[in-house]
């Protein structure tokens, strides 16, 4: 998708398609599976310094690159440097249709190297055009986003000056604004039975597998309602086919945009586990951990207004988006920096079918550039 051209040259028109694409491909060549961000972190630090930023790195590897503005005010632009899973050696393939894919054996890594590439292109253009009016920008590149928003959870935002921000890390149509994200809770459920020889004296055993199976069968999973989902994703336990297993561990999650609904779902899942355990004289440990908390940004709040104004200036339609997943924006919002999340063009993120259209990569960069160079809006309603 390309923006509708205007009669007046805008800063967004200055985005260099070929340079942006080259930067994106260079970043894809740097392996950075979550938990292994050292190399990509070093690359980013060097690039940000070359582009005129003052950079700092915290003790887990989050990088804050401050690009000085030409007018008062400071905003946050957030991306993450890790890629999902363990894939390395990613080889992008540019199709005749202008879409970048892989050969289907790995993810692409557009999540979130498309966002990183867009930020670098914006920095280059701002540095080349000091006559443009734009605020100071704190470009935050986090680690461990794919493993539960580790970087943003850890980041000390008291060191930031941003009043509001934008997270370049979502899918969705170009022009969408993610204004609402759910609370997510991770579950670790451990069933304790009794080990016994399955062929000689099964009567002495209590099968943790059987207890876990009955508990899962009693749970409502999948799409619970419009705002709530739940899942049991892994099951581990047992040691041999002729040994009644005494321990089984389930890992799952529940999410909802409504806290009351989430609480009810978690309570129902816990009850299913406890009832199954009691029926077999087993025991269960039900551990829940809140990974991130919901946020909802009003349309008249500053980050939404600024994003919407920039999107419309490019001739695109603003599309409010309610997300089923989380981004670093969940933690920035929770820590007092209101943010909306914006698409970078990525499609099928986390899958080997992940791809991105070059046109959309360009538009995402243009949206960001339009946001930072548009006339300053009022400070009311942060």
Image: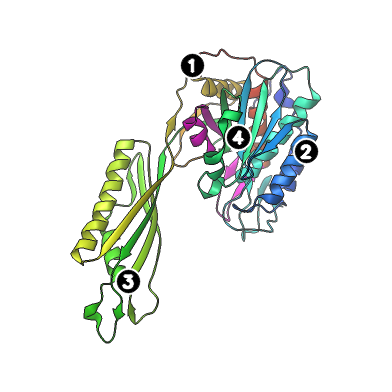
Q: Is mark 2 on a helix, strand or loop?
A: helix
Alpha-carbon neighbours of circle 1 within 10 Å: few (<14), some, or many (≥20)?
Answer: few
Rendered position, 230 above or below 330: below
Pointer 3 with pointer 1, Cβ within 8 A: no
Q: Which of marks 3 and 4 is nearer the N terminus?
A: 4
Does the segment drawn in magenta span residue 282? no
Residue at the left extreme? 279
What x and y, as percent, mark residue 231?
37, 53
Q: How far apart are marks 2 and 4 (CA)?
A: 21 Å
Q: Earlier in the sequence, mark 2 or mark 4?
A: 2
Q: Nearer the viewer, mark 2 or mark 4?
A: 4
**In this figure, which residue is indicated by the disc labeled 1?**
381
In the picture, the disc for residue 246 is: 3
**In this figure, which residue is indicated by the disc labeled 4?**
78
Instruction: Report the label total.
Output: 4
In the picture, the disc for residue 19 is: 2
Rendered position, 10 above or below 251: above
Q: How far apart are marks 3 and 2 (CA)?
A: 58 Å
Q: Earlier in the sequence, mark 1 or mark 2?
A: 2
Say which residue appears at 28% left-offset and 52% top-offset.
270
Q: Which of marks 4 and 1 is nearer the N terminus?
A: 4
**Side of 289 where 193 appears, left or right:** left
Q: Give the range drawn in magenta.
A: 328-357
């Amino acid at each position: 998708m390309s923006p509708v051209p205007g009669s007046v040259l805008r800063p967004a028109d200055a985005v260099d398609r070929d340079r942006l694409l080259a930067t994106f491909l260079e970043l894809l060549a740097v392996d950075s599976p979550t938990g292994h961000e050292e190399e990509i972190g070093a690359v980013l630090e060097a690039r940000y310094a070359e582009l005129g930023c003052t950079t700092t790195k915290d003790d887990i590897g989050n990088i804050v690159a401050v690009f000085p503005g030409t007018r008062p005010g400071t905003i946050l632009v957030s991306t993450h440097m890790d890629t999902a899973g363990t894939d390395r050696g990613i080889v992008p393939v540019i199709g005749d249709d202008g879409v970048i894919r892989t050969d289907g054996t790995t993810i692409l890594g557009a999540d979130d190297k498309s966002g990183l590439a867009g930020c670098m292109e914006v920095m280059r253009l701002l540095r080349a055009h000091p006559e443009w009016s734009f605020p100071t920008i704190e470009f935050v590149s986090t680690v461990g986003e794919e493993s539960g928003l580790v970087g943003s959870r850890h980041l000390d935002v008291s060191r930031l000056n941003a009043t509001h921000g934008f997270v370049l890390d979502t899918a969705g149509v170009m022009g969408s604004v993610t204004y609402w994200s759910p609370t997510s809770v991770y579950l670790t459920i451990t069933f304790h039975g009794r080990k016994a020889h399955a062929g000689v004296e099964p009567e002495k055993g209590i099968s943790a597998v059987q207890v876990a199976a009955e508990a899962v069968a009693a749970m409502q999973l999948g799409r619970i309602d419009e705002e709530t989902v739940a899942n049991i994703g892994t099951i581990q336990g047992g040691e041999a086919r002729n040994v009644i297993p005494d321990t089984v561990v389930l890992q799952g999650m529940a999410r909802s945009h409504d806290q009351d609904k989430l609480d009810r779902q978690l309570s129902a899942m816990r009850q299913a586990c406890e009832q199954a355990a009691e029926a077999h004289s087993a025991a269960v440990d039900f551990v829940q951990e809140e990974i991130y908390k919901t946020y909802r940004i009003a349309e008249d709040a500053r980050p939404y207004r600024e994003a919407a104004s920039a999107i419309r200036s490019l001739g695109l339609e603003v599309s409010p988006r309610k997300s089923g997943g989380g981004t670093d924006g969940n933690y920035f919002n929770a820590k007092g920096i209101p943010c909306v999340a914006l698409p970078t063009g990525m499609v099928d993120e986390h899958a080997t079918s992940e791809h991105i259209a070059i046109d959309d990569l360009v538009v995402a960069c243009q949206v960001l550039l339009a946001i930072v160079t548009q006339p300053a809006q009022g400070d009311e309603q942060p």
